[in-house]
Image (tube, coloured by chain):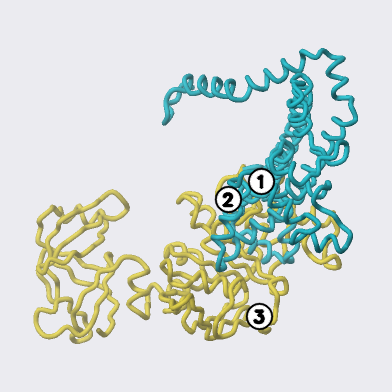
Amino acid sequence: MSIEVTGVSRLYGAHRALDNVSLTVQDGELLALLGPSGSGKTTLLRVMAGLEQADAGSVNFFGQDARQQSLRQRNVGFVFQHYALFRHMTVFENVAFGLRVKPRRDRPPRREITRRVQELLGLVQLDGLAQRHPSQLSGGQRQRVALARALAIRPRVLLLDEPFGALDAQVRRELRQWLRKLHDDIGLTSVFVTHDQEEALELADRVAVVHRGRIEQIGTPQEVYHRPQTPFVVSFLGSVNLFHGRIEQGRPVLHDNDGRPTTRIFVRPHDFEVSSQHGPDSVPAILELANTAGPLARLQLRDTKGRAIAVELSLERFRVMRLARGDQLYLTPTQAQVFAT
Amino acid sequence: MAGRRVIPGFGLSLGFTLFYLGLLVLLPLAALVVKASSLGFAGFAQVLGSPQVQAALRVSFVSAAIAALGNGLFGLLLAWVLVRYRFIGRRAIDALVDLPFALPTAVAGIALATLYAPQGWIGQWFARADIQIAYTRAGIVVALTFVGLPFVVRTLQPVLLDLDAEVEQAARSLGASRWQTFSRVILPALVPALITGMTLAFARAAGEYGSVVFIAGNMPGQTEIAPLVIMTRLEQFDYAGATAVGAAMLAVSLLLLLAVNLLQAWTRRKLGGA
């Protein structure tokens, strides 16, 4: 256990940024804190780093109470969302900073510093840019300088705040894969914050879904995606349709025409069986829009009560069915997440 | 110039800029040089060679330099406090900083002279330690510090506001002490603005007349500033002599400003600019 957060709360005035949060970061894992903006995920990361103090609860760092440790003793590598590079220093000096400010007795000799910085720049694929200034680098390069700088102090944990937030989609995807590989190579316990569910699911060993200052669920990407424990987790991890219905003989019934609705049923767009024939428990709906520019046909339908339903079909099936606007279709969920109202 | 600009008329605006600068700045300066040159080289050398003029030039520039250094130190502190902390009366203090700009310099000079005179509120405490401030070079430095303060504070404030708090946190998380964070991260970011502010304060102080004459004592060779020498010569209808001293001040100022600009360019290169 690298970091153990127990019952941590953090208040900003009357706003509860963190509400009794407990979390354990396993040794060597890559953990994602996933949540919408304002959910408290960055605050949690900053409390772990010691950049912010908890109002209640404790943070345990490798078996030691973190409150008794200075930032230097904690030895955390922190990568800031906007990199926070030292603008007046070269790339080399940025990376060397953490080594140069060490107390004299711990400070490596000059030659060792040079060697280690070169090694790190090689690791983040920035050899040859050592004498540049941050203003002369692209966003992705700056991000990697920030990473190398954080790694230079040989941290026990690496914490990253929205590491890819400020990059464009292409660079983002590349850097994401690169970071995963780097993590596998050096095996450093890492925690990163993101609001992008795709990023969290693709990159992390475990995902903690944060909402309103609490952790809604924590588990592997497969667990949180396929076995969400709260309505929020379902709706945050990808688009979803919400129905009010009930369960009959173990099967979800999506309409609430007869009888009182007793459950909330969430169905993902690709978890529908689409048919032009009426079936048992199917929902009738009219096709309004079809977008076929992509790997799937994305349909927008409207049910008899005027509610929009999003459905995804394979392009092949879409063509075979010869669907057109205004068609009457019947939807049957093949898979659903059910929560009591 | 082919690309479309938001504001049109490069030719027109450049022409106007040159005309305006020429009319307001270059023409009077040229007149100064022309008038001074009417003395001829020998006359020029004679005016500048006089011990009184040399002493006055030295007093002006040295005092201005000391005042600028002092303003650099305390202006930085003041700007820091005004930007970084929230306290009651902050806005009032912020407004006070501009007062040396607004106050007629003569008023400031008389006020300072009264305060720092041996019987004055502040001067009497120094007088007990046998230190005299008013009517000495120390008094000149006090007055020049007063007029130069806003330049440093006002040039530093926006830069300090712009400093990213995360950069400091980054330094701290990398293990830097408070002092290391300040000296290695914050101060280098401020140096260009600090140099600019101190240069402005220096330039203003070197030519300052109104506030200084009241507190300086004006002893020739001791506490007489160069602008006063110019005034005195004007009153004696020695226009050429006055302009000669003026031209000398102009030359020294230009050289110093040039040196500062080179220093500025050098630090910008070294610190990576942005």
Task: Name the colour assigned to chain B in the rendering.
Answer: cyan
* Colour of chain A in the rendered structure image: yellow
Asked whether the residues under the numbered discs 1 and 2 touch, taking CB atoms below 8 Å apart as contact, a structural biologist would say yes
Frontmost residue, B2 versus A315? B2
Q: Amino acid at mark 2?
A: Pro
Dot 2: within a 10 Å radius of its alpha carbon, few (fewer than 14), some, or many (20 or more) residues?
Answer: few
Specify the label residue B193 is tagged with.
1
Q: Circle 1 sits in a helix, a strand or a loop, which is it?
A: helix
**Quadrant of the image occupied by residue A274:** bottom left
Mark 2–mark 3 distance (CA, rounded to whole Å): 36 Å
- Would you place residue A77 above or below residue B223 in this image? below
Label 3: few (<14), some (14–19) or many (≥20) C-alpha neighbours in 10 Å:
many
Between discs 1 and 2, the one toward the N terminus: 2
Quarter holding the C terminus of chain B? top right
Residue at left 59%, top 55%?
B96
Using residue B60 as the reference point, say whether residue A263 is left or right of it. left
Amino acid at dot 1: Ala
Residue that badge 2 annotates? B158
Mark 1 crowd level (few <14, some 14–19, many ≥20, 10 Å Cα): many
Q: Chain of mark 3?
A: A
Q: Residue at 82% of width from left, 12% of height from top?
A: B40
In the displayed structure, does residue A102 sit left or right of residue B20?
A: right
Tag 3 residue: A66
Q: Residue B68: where, in percent of width, then height?
A: 74, 46
Task: Measure the alpha-carbon separation of dots 1 and 3.
Answer: 39 Å
**Count of residue discs:** 3
Residue B230 visible in the picture? yes
Is residue A4 rendered to the left or right of residue B40?
left
In the depicted structure, whether residue B40 falls above or below residue A207: above
